[in-house]
Image (tube, rainbow, N blue to C red):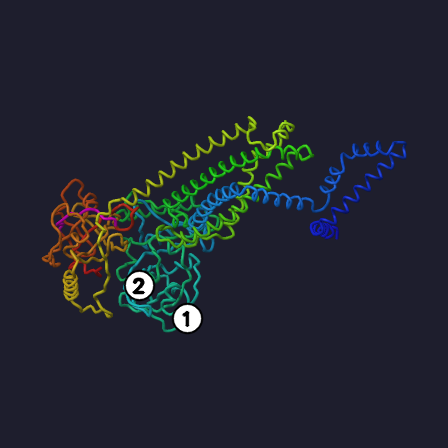
Amino acid sequence: MNGWRRIRAVFSTLWDKRKVENDLDAEMRAFGEMLADEKMAKGMTEKEARRSTLAEVGGLEQLKQAVRDERAGSGVEQLWQDVRFGVRQLRRSPGFAVTGLLIIAIGLGLTTTMYSIVYAVILKPLPFAHPERLVAVEAKPWKPFSLPTIADWMKGSRAFESMSAYTGWSPRIESSAGVGHVNAVLVSQNFLSELGVPLRLGHDFTQSGNEKDCFGQAIVTERYWRRMGGGDALVGRTLQLDYQTYTVVGVVAFRAPLEDMDGLDQPSILTPIGCDPAKHPDRRGDGSLQVVARLRPGVSLGIALQELLVAQKNLARTYPREYPAEFAPVLIPLNDFISGTENRSALLATLTACGMLLLISCANLTNLLLARDMRRKAEFALRTMLGAGPLRIFRQVLTENATLVALGSILGLMLASVLVRLASRSKLMNLPRLNEASVDLRVVMFAVALSSVIAILLTILPALRGRRTGLTEDLRSGSSSSSSSPRGLRRAGHLLVAAQVAMAFVLVAVSGWMVSSVYILLHQPLGFDPDHLLFASTDLRGPKHSASIDPAVTLGKLRKILNEVSRIPGVAEVAAANDKPLGGRVNQYGFCSDVHPEDCQRANPNAPDVFAVTPRYFDTVSQMLFRGRAFNDADDGKDHVAIVNRALAQQQWPGENPVGHRIFSGGLNAWATVVGEVGDVRSYSLERAPIPNLYLPEADGRPEPQ
């Protein structure tokens, strides 16, 4: 009941302020008259009694202020008065107000934008069950694994609750959504259940325990399901992958972050590993899989890694030909694995740079506030002489600055909202989980906390102005701008300028590093000339696949198309390949050379990407030929020949001429003679260095041309 009365008193005070003030004035006057009457009763004259009363109570206004301070709701009332006074101060100085608002809006808007991106890419927990227990398994010197390796790791370690495998796939697809190629992923049967990814429709893959089983099952993403027509019924819904029919058994509701996992590349279709005839899940040497594992509750990353290393050492003793001595597994938290080390460093550096820009902005604004407050010396002096202590002056200045910062923060959040929306939709930044960035409640709370810190930083030095002595001098100087500023404030201003210059130097250094990194990245040699280069994709095998179709027929169709395209006015060169430069969808097969024939007997970490190309391909993309010759029409697949890039030549025959050497490729299942050496091309991205590439004639590779 007492609490309710106090609340009512607060609101009644705020609601009927004029009546309360009139009552207070009448009450204080009555109190003064009563004291004066008592003194006159003791023999004082009326004039002496009134003078003694004023001296005793310290003045009527001071007494009224003391009552106001003790009254319920006085703090809220004073806060509202200070806010209104702060707004009037801003309206009185529109130039200063606009400058301050822009400084805060730009500095806080940029910092909040970067925090939104950093939170979405790095800090935001994965939407899985207990994501802190999920780890990605990699290894040195290479990371693809085989299912027998994964099974033996599980047997040799108790730290893991489960392990699942996955690998990318790009099959030809035919469904109600159309015909073409699709980004798919081959997964172990426990992949979705281990991650805890929900299914919107249907059920998970059949858990047979034998990864060679396929059951002709496919799970599609919700996005692709809408392209297939959507609906809530799976009965009778099928699709074809590489001419094999699959039944759609489920619709998975994941988008990011699984789409950003290395090797998944925004998949639309998931199928069991056993569905790819090119995969041999039971072979220890078929190492093309990536691994995600779930730790048992309470197991640390270090303990799990130690157990995994012990299990791998036992495997190396049992299978010395499959596991070289330098092969060692590595565990990475799945969140860190998805975000990427390079992305984390770049984003944190950018966030730091934005933070320093905000600090410089605060230093600039503090100097402006100091200059403005120098013209308010008489006001602060008068308030001090009327009884306002340092705390009251600090509260007033803090409220004024908080009003300015609050308005600037609102503009900054509006700016951040626009910038985050543009960044999430932009194709310029290839960051994982970027589409999840938004100005949500967490980001708003970050901005509020940052605004509070800014308001306090902007208040400390100006508020110290109220603690100075020499009030008479301040009253005399009034608002004169020519009066000299105090030595302490001048020293503080000099320190602010020095700190600002120091932070500016650091910011320029960081910005220069970032600009130079971007410049170097954009000017990396591609290994080909993209100017006036046009790519088109086609499938020559038709809607139905038959093993009886002679590859020579497909080759004849392709050559006819190339011949017709070459006759189009403006076409200088034309060729075909199974993938384009920077396409990132390249096949890898078992590989060895005549120098290291033992690599054919085990998983080879040095297996190159294999391209199947037609004659004139290197002239078409302007890829330099260093040694030997390019392919010609005589390379019909009977006498196997191959061309290597410089990276593969240096890897296999360092310091030698590769022409004349022999290589074995699983894509041919035969030995071939190297007839040429070409320059390196970036196959995946600008930031990824060129890797070994092997080129085969189209007649040998039988590509799906582009």
Disc 2 secondary structure class: helix
- For the residues labelled 2 and 1, the Cα–Cα distance comes to 26 Å
Neighbor class of circle 2 (other Cα within 10 Å; few <14, some 14-19, many 20+) is many
Of helix, strand and loop, which one carries label 1? loop
Would you say residue 674 sits in the magenta stretch? yes
Mark 1 is on which residue type?
Gly
Residue 548, position as x, y percentages in the image: 18, 69
Residue 374 magenta-highlighted: no
Circle number at residue 328:
none
Residue type, numbered disc 2: Cys
Determine whether, in the image, residue 16 is placed left or right of residue 452. right
Give the label on residue 275, or none.
2
* Quadrant of the drawing holding the C terminus: bottom left
Viewer-nearest residue: 499 or 267: 499
Please provide the residue range marked out in magenta.
673-682
The image quarter in which residue 521 lies: top left
User: Would you say 536 lies left or right of 200 here?
Assistant: left
Local packing at callout 1 (Cα closer than 10 Å; few below 14, some 14-19, many 20+) is few
Q: Which residue is mark 1?
A: 231
| Predominant secondary structure, magenta span | strand
451 left or right of 580 in image = right
Q: Residue 126 location in percent, x, y? A: 44, 53
The answer to whether residue 242 is left or right of residue 507 is left
Residue drawn at (82%, 40%) of the image: 31
